[in-house]
Amino acid sequence: MSENEDKTVNRRRLLRRAGTVAAGVAGTAVVGATVATPAQAAPGDPVVQGADNVAGSSTTSLSINSAGPTLALDNTRITEQDDWRLSSPALQLKPRGDFLNDNSPVGSVGVDQFGNFQVVSIPGYVDYVQTTGNSNSIVPITPQRLVDTRTAAGRARIVNASSTTLDSSGRLRDGQTIHLDLSEYVFIGEALFGNLTVTTTVASGFVQVFPHGVTRPKEFSSINYLTNQTLSNSIMTGIGYDFDYISVYAARTTHIIIDIVAFVVGVGSVNPAILPYSASATSRGAEATVDPAAKRAARAKQGTPSWK
């Protein structure tokens, strides 16, 4: 793996775990130059800067008689890391326990030991707050043709195209696997929905579509076909962890066509140019004239897509 690819992988892993890492340090402490011992403050006493302020059994309330915010927190520190500008937290909630106490008042918010936010929405019930760390979204797109092995242009997104994987007409050979690059369409994708077509099959067989980077599963097929048959089937597959690739295996030689209709994303995002009714959707005609292989090489070098 090249240095640029390694940086890309590390950046993807940083983003993927961003929504699941638990917070540290107590949220009631005020940031200061020196951390002192806890200050025992009686009701009405001021908060001591640079110290852990222990309220005991008392509850501190803030109120304001204007349209402005009741409380504003600001941490202006920015850390530069690998071309990213990382902000420092304005507030931290201390992770405690497995669940927020369901006897807490409605509107209470807490963080469990795994970093999941919980909230009491109605008396006696605790709900999880959905984030990109614990949930995903299905994003429909303007249908895109990912691969069509019948033409040279249709094979441009095959990462490992060679005489070993493809025959002289471009068909996926017996017992071979190709890897397809999705980086034109999605950044840190989780899965995709689409349609798989096989045509000009040389013998009865099957095709498997699966996430790149995992051992090919043995006991499944995405489509089954007979000799010299053209057949289609809907598919859903996960996307590789380190790169936005999927893998396609053919038991017997056949042409492969895959069209994508939607992506599943969490911390990632979909290229806005392929979103239905997007203001930038009209740019797809011009963008399609750019060599996909050249774009793939450029994005591998910079580590993030040009549309981010």
Image (cartoon, rainbow, N blue to C red):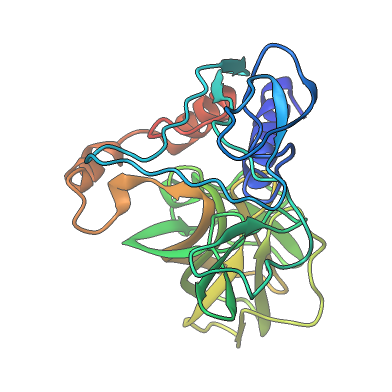
Give the quarter of the figure containing the C terminus. Answer: top left
Q: Would you say 45 lies left or right of 14 here?
A: left
Question: Where does the image place residue 233, in percent across and percent down from the top left?
Answer: 49, 82
Q: What's the residue at 68%, 29% (across, down)? A: 5
The part of the image, by quadrant, that contains residue 242 is top right
Quadrant in which the N terminus is drawn: top right
Q: Using the rendered view, name the quadrant where residue 275 is placed.
A: bottom left
In the figure, is residue 145 to the left or right of 213? left
Q: Position of residue 141 (x, y in %)?
A: 34, 61
Residue at figure coordinates x 76%, y 19% from the top left: 35
Q: How many marks?
A: 0
Kindly identify the residue that appears in the image at 21 percent across and 48 percent down.
281
Vertical side of 285 occupied by 35: above or below: above
In terms of depth relative to the viewer, which is nearer, 197 or 253? 197
Taking 231 as reference, is 280 above or below it?
A: above
Q: Where is residue 93 in the image (x, y as percent from the top left)?
A: 65, 45
Q: Is residue 48 visible?
A: yes
Q: Residue at x 64, y 75 (%)?
A: 102
Does the rendering let one see residue 166? no
Q: Where is residue 39 in the image (x, y as percent from the top left)?
A: 74, 29
**Nearest to the observer: residue 120 or residue 37:** 37
96 sits left or right of 182 in the view: right
Using the image, determine if residue 179 lies above or below residue 39.
below
Q: Nearer the viewer, residue 280 or 222?
A: 280
